[in-house]
Image (spheres, rainbow, N blue to C red):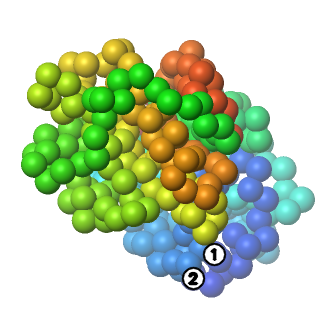
Amino acid sequence: MKTTNPKDVDQILEFLNSANYQFASYLYKLPQMHNDIRTVISDAIKDPGVFASVNEQNQITMLILALKYEHNKYKVIGPFLAENIKPSIEDMNHLFESLAKSKPDFANFNFSFEENEQDYLPFMKSLGASYNFTDYHLITTKDMGEVNNTQNIIEYQPAFYRYFSKLHNETFKHDVMTADEIVESLDDCHRLFIFMSEGLLKGYLFLEIYENNHIAEIKYFSSHSDYRLMGIAFDLLSYSLHFAFTSYNINKIYFKIRSKNSTLVERFNELGFNINYEYKKFKYVAAYI
């Protein structure tokens, strides 16, 4: 097989529509990109490029691309395999390395795989990619009732903007709503709760309600680094669960948390949450190998 750089968006899209996704990193990105998939492919062609393995008939047998999210930082999408093709780990490595070698050695390439659904460890081990963290998607259908410290939790007021904005910006860096966007979105279905103690804003939680679908999302929550492990985040979560289940016609609440600590994540069972999806994240930097 030889490696090429296809630039025909229609050809690439046709291959993706019929490809085997078993080994594909960031597989869940494809449904999210459905409405602008052609733009995504066009952007990938420009940087870092789309790379494909082709057979003697010049037909694509394997394809990989990446989404740029910062300078020299990419989310790898793929590899995608043609039906009835079973490439070796070495073949997949070779295709990815063609992508990686197109950028400087210090460029970051990030991978994401769904635990228990994809076979990714042999590929990551062969590449020398390092485990980074896990994204846990948790869901609950239970109202755990009234919680402690409700006197410390109030709805956001403009007077707290500077403190909320600082904490949000320090906690969340990439692909998130800004503090201004959160504040501007506030209405009956977008609620921002803050934890106040000793005159200080020590934590916050942003809740989005989708009542037509009977679900709610805890979009962001955090406690100040000086007050971690004091139960502030748990109080905010407990409060928002009770508030949402009793104030709206919903039957599910979910959120995502990023952690390397599975024991910490298991603590959310105390609030009625169970893991719905689990995505293992890996990072490859050629300079680290």
- Circle 1 residue: 12
Name the one closer to the observer, 123 or 27.
27
Question: Horizontally, is 67 left or right of 103 in the view?
Answer: right
Vertical placement of 85 versus 23: above or below?
A: below
x, y percent for residue 178: 26, 56
Question: Horizontally, is 64 left or right of 21 in the view?
Answer: left
Instruction: Count residues near mark 1 (Cα–Cα under 10 Å), then give few for <14, some for 14-19, many for 20+.
Output: some
Quadrant in which residue 273 is drawn: top right
Vertical placement of 212 versus 86: above or below?
A: below
Quadrant in which residue 279 is drawn: top right
Residue depicted at x 54% and y 63%: 210
x, y percent for residue 227: 25, 19
Vertical placement of 179 versus 141: above or below?
A: below
Q: How many marks?
A: 2
Spatial distance from mark 1 to mark 2, Cα to Cα?
6 Å
Question: Horizontally, is 180 left or right of 275 in the view?
Answer: left
Residue depicted at x 76% and y 35%: 116
Q: Amino acid at mark 2?
A: Asp
Q: Quadrant of the C terminus?
A: top left
Can residue 169 be seen by looking at this rendering?
A: no
Residue depicted at x 59% and y 21%: 270
Mark number, residue 8: 2
x, y percent for residue 24: 67, 51
